[in-house]
Image (tube, rainbow, N blue to C red):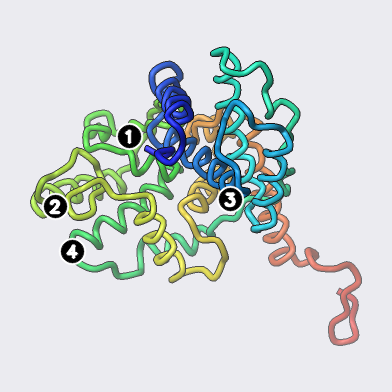
Amino acid sequence: MFGCENSTDEYMLENDFLHYLKAERNYSDLTIESYKESLSEFSKFIEKEGNKVDWTAIQSGDIREWIVNLMDKRSAATTVNTRLSALRSFYRFLYLRGKINYNPTATITGPKKKKTLPKFVRESQMDKLLDQINFPDNYQGQRDHLILQTFYSTGIRLAELVGLNVNDVDFSAHTLKVTGKRNKQRIIPLGPEIEHELRNYINRRATENKNIDNALFLNNGKRISRLQVTKIVKNNLSLVTTAEHLSPHILRHSFATAMLNNGAEIEAVKELLGHASLGTTQIYTHTTFEELKKIYTQAHPRGGKTGQQTDGKIK
């Protein structure tokens, strides 16, 4: 646990908070780890300023300086807001427990996010990656191909894929059980192609891994890490696209975009993605509309600029 350099009282406050997230809020281990990391980063910032960490003495100005420091380091607005969210939760907890009579995060607002359309990989590029690229004929190659297939066929998040266990696959019902944010579970249907690949992979997984963990995806017999999965995705996507920021999340975007482009109802896509509100899913309708505009411009005989002149004739 972090906080070992702090006083015993500060250490206890941190650990009581993390225990509360687990026991009372039912947060996932990955979320709790993220909160722990955020508190650790803030406490290190305070120590660098020459002060001893005293959670009950922190002022709003200290938090604003921390945010400015993160932005100066070119941290993304999303990252800063995630860190700030953890700090807000911690101080709400301290306030409700009577440890403080003033919440220093109450008046703090995080940086605004840039409204950008989600990036995605084209269907033709994914077809090339999954159908034409030769993966190594061994456990690792089979695992890596299935990881890419799973992301693209189900739209699940990185943390959800890492958390999959073998018994989450139900071949009789043709479904995959996914544990999402705050341990909410949802059921995703499996198509014949990915189900066939899962059967072959699970058989090979059992014969080629010692000290087998219950995890679906393994690395050296243990549950694969988020970092390892991210590296697998980045390395393989770079074979078919020159797009920047190649990550597992781009495959989630690709799944949603492909579904909508091929006629899926937005409500169904919302349920498959595990979104709490339809508004979160609706950003993909803008993505598909932009894609349709490109297709129209390129394919329709009058899709180009009005009055474009070719060979002396107006077209």
Q: Name the amino acid type tagged 2.
A: Arg
Q: Name the amino acid type tagged 1.
A: Leu
The residue shown at (41%, 46%) is: 153
The residue shown at (73%, 56%) is: 293
Circles 2 and 1: CB atoms closer than 8 Å: no
Q: What residue would you read off at disc 1?
A: 176
- x%, y% of residue 180? 43, 32
Give the mark nearest the N terminus, 2 or 1.
Answer: 1
Q: What residue would you read off at disc 2?
A: 204
**Disc 2 packing (10 Å; few <14; some 14–19; many ≥20):** some
> Gap between marks 3 and 2, in whole Å?
50 Å
> Gap between marks 1 and 4, in whole Å?
24 Å
Q: Nearer the viewer, mark 3 or mark 2?
A: 3
Say which element carries label 4. loop
Q: Is residue 10 left or right of residue 56?
A: left
The residue shown at (63%, 29%) is: 57
| Among the 4 quarters of the image, the one containing residue 310 | bottom right
Q: Name the amino acid type tagged 3.
A: Lys
The residue shown at (46%, 52%) is: 248
- x%, y% of residue 236? 40, 65
- x%, y% of residue 273? 50, 36
> Gap between marks 2 and 1, in whole Å?
19 Å
Q: Nearer the viewer, mark 1 or mark 3?
A: 3
Mark sitting on residue 167? none
Give the mark nearest the N terminus, 2 or 4.
Answer: 4
Q: In the rendered view, tell whether residue 204 sits above or below residue 9.
A: below
Q: Which image quarter is the N terminus in?
A: top left
Say which element carries label 2. helix
Q: Which image quarter is the C terminus in?
A: bottom right
Q: What residue would you read off at disc 3?
A: 48
Q: Residue 184, can we see it? A: no
Mark sitting on residue 138? 4
